Image (cartoon, rainbow, N blue to C red):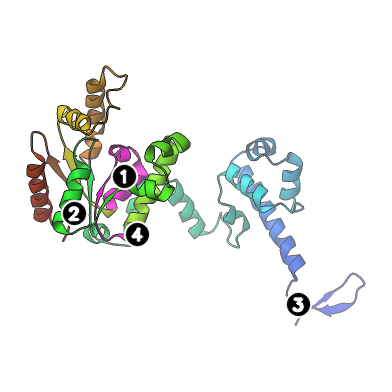
Amino acid sequence: MSEVTDFQGRARAAGPPGPEAEAEALIRRVGDRVRKARELKGIPRRVLSERSGVSPRYLAQLEAGEGNISIALLSRVATALDYRIEWLIGEEDPWTSDLVRMTELFRTAPADLRTRALSLLAPESDDEARAERLCLLGLRGAGKSTLGERLGARLGVPFVELNREIEDHSGMPVTEVMALYGQEGYRDLEARALDRIIATHSRVILAVAGGIVSEPDTFARLLAHFHTIWIKASPEDHMDRVRAQGDTRPMAGNPEAMATLRTILTSREALYDRAEARLDTTGRSLAQSEDDLAALVTARGFLG
């Protein structure tokens, strides 16, 4: 065992660092990383202070390795620097570690690149990833829920409405979710609900809200884990079916309701067209559309 000299010049055995020394080393490491991250991004300390809500004096102490900053404040600093807090604390240097660099690149990559990266790192065929899951896409009034429920009963496959899953988990109707959390909050709950269904169902028929295709990350995950069918209908059929359900929202206070509906259909057509298959229910009875859907699913082997 090596020896070190204490402040009185006496020799003593050098052992592993104690808790206090480890804590001091951690504080210095965090300070160095905060300073380096700030300098690399070209952010003055005053600006970082404004973004994080941590005083300039406290930041100066932190960067000097003298600030025993709380986890809560350090989290705010990390967020202001657009870094994960564990990168400031962990043993691995975030600027030299391939793992940390890959994590950052993955986090900031577009949804399609993340999907491709996952497929390369964990190769899985499309059929394996989608299992026997079927999702019906389309605008409200296309018949997704009615057809999905009837097909599920016909084939003995569980049927799930994504909005119903959101309501069951949140304990409130979707309208209240939207009023309380807004569109962004609803989309977050929608993504989480989709993940739960993927994790708990390897065989299921799912009906989703028409706007899910406008959320790139969620839609990419949906396409990767479900066989998809776009349930199409003419604008007139869409409107008639919504009216028949007693839903007057599309017309309420909107004399241009049909023009608006046509615009929505046109704007989403390219997104809906990313589905594996299409089923046009225009002018078809419910029984006819059910038979058409069952024949399509069987022919494509979507449910085994």
Amino acid type assigned to the residue bearing label 1 in the image:
Phe
The residue wearing badge 2 is: 152
Q: Position of residue 65 (x, y in %)?
A: 74, 53
Q: Position of residue 5 (x, y in %)?
A: 85, 74
Q: Position of residue 269 (x, y in %)?
A: 22, 34
- Which of the two residues, 116 or 71, is positioned nearer the viewer here? 71
Q: Which range is magenta?
A: 201-224
Question: Dot 3 lies on which element?
Answer: loop
Tell us which disc is closer to us: 2 or 4: 2
The residue wearing badge 3 is: 15
Question: Dot 2 lies on which element?
Answer: helix
| Res. 112 visible in picture | no
Tag 4: Cα neighbours inside 10 Å, few (<14), some, or many (≥20)? few
Amino acid type assigned to the residue bearing label 2 in the image:
Gly
Give the mark nearest the N terminus, 3 or 2: 3
Tell us which disc is closer to us: 3 or 1: 1
- Which of the two residues, 265 or 201, is positioned nearer the viewer here? 201
Mark 1 touches mark 4? (CB < 8 Å):
no
